[in-house]
Structures are given as C-alpha cells and as structure tokens.
Image (cartoon, rainbow, N blue to C red):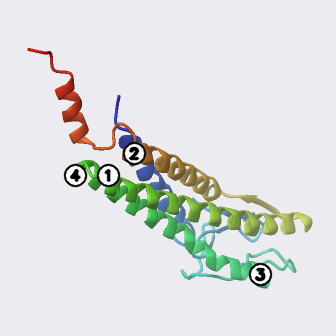
Amino acid sequence: MPNPIGPALFLSFAAVVLFVFVSVSPPVWDKISFLNIYTPEGDTAFGVFGACIKGGVCSRRSVGYTLAAPGTGNVNLNQTVLHKLTYTLILHPIAGALALLALLFGFLGLALASRILTILMSVFAFLGAIVGLVVFVIDMVIWNVLKNRLHDNDISASLGNANWLTVAAVFSLFVATCTAMLGAFGRFATGRAAGEKVGCDLEMPR
C-alpha cells in the first residue's frame, strides 16, 4: 500500500499554486478576481491588493485599499467596515506561505523518513487550512455585501474565480492534513525504515 505522504505532498503543492494564483489577482492580474463590476464606464475587478479597470488602469498595490469603481454613482462601496476588512485579504498569501512550509516539511519528512517532520507538515497544512477558511468567510462577507448593494442599484456584478480557488486550496490543505497524519502515525509512519522492515518480514524462511 502506498505511503499517504505522497498525496499529502501533492495536495499541499496544489494549495500553494492556488494561493499564488489568488495572490496575483488585481492589481497584478485581472484574469483572477474576487468581484467583477460591469458598467458602461468600464468593468472593474477586485483582488487581494487592489483593483483594475479591465483594459485600463490599476490601483497601486497595498494592504487594504479603497473599494471604488467607475459608474457606480452614489453607491457607497467603501463603507468603513468593508474598507477595514480589505486589510484581512493579506491572509490569502499568508495561508499560501503556510502551505509552502507544509510542503517543505513534507519533502524533508519523506526524504529523511522522519515522523517529526511529517507531523510538522500536518501542523502547517492545518494552520494554512484554518487561515484560508477564515479569510474565505471574510471574502464572502465583503464581496456578497458589495454585490447585493450594487444589484439593489441595478448595477451588474458577480463573484470572481478567486473565491473558488480559495475554497479548493482550503479543501486541499484539510485533506493534506489528514493524509499527513496517517503518514506520521499509521503503519507507514517510519517511512523507508518501515519499508525495509516489511521487506525483511516478507523474506522466505531458509
């Protein structure tokens, strides 16, 4: 039976990649976004560190930013509470960093057949999943409030793909946590040493 550390490594790697994509959302790359607003003056995409008018200009990168879009008229997008919540979007790359640490500890645990390193992988994967889950809940609050407020004023808006990439990353890390724990405490726990022991046990008697 294969060692479950393999799937844990793959899932941690997948989570890192997903959080990287989320983190390079506007103002870096407008193809990935949390909320898209569609107006005759231009479509606006919101990301972790700012916003972009598609095909036009982007805001400067910052932790916490002003929620504004052309063509939204008197709709108060930048309400104090919502503006303060944009500072929490930094948790996306933080969750990605925790996933990266989980991946590194997983590789070391596999290479060195170390139970402690595999446990550390599980711990960091779990922390990354929790941080990712928390920020996803915050995402849903910010972007759904804005979307509903815009719809109430007959302005078209939709949730972007960054939200679902975050969900996929969080799910991957929770599953990676479980499989890493199996690798640390299951019958596979001692890695290559366990394989050598099983190999000896299967030797034919002389």
- Mark 3–mark 4 Cα distance, whole angstroms, equals 48 Å
- Give the vertical position of 68 relative to 24 (above or below): below
- Mark 1–mark 2 Cα distance, whole angstroms, equals 8 Å
Can you give x and y, in whole percent of width and height, for residue 46 in the image?
A: 65, 69
* Contact between labelled residues 4 and 3, with CB atoms less than 8 Å apart: no
Mark 2: few/some/many CA within 10 Å (<14, 14-19, 20+)? few
* Contact between labelled residues 2 and 1, with CB atoms less than 8 Å apart: yes
Q: Is residue 191 left or right of residue 82?
A: left
Q: Amino acid at mark 4?
A: Leu
Farthest-out residue, left = 206
Residues 36 and 120: in front is: 120
Taking the spot 69% from the left edge, 68% from the top edge, the residue there is 138
Q: Amino acid at mark 2?
A: Phe
Q: Is residue 57 left or right of residue 185?
A: right
Taking the spot 37% from the left edge, 47% from the top edge, the residue there is 184
Q: How many circles with numbers are drawn on the protein?
A: 4
Can you give x and y, in whole percent of width and height, for residue 107 in the image?
A: 30, 52
- Give the vertical position of 110 relative to 156 (above or below): above
Secondary structure of residue under mark 2: helix
- Give the vertical position of 182 relative to 115 (above or below): above
Q: Does label 1 or label 2 sit earlier along the sequence?
A: 1
| Residue at mark 2 | 185
| Residue at mark 4 | 112
The disc label shown at residue 115, or none: 1
Q: Amino acid at mark 3?
A: Val
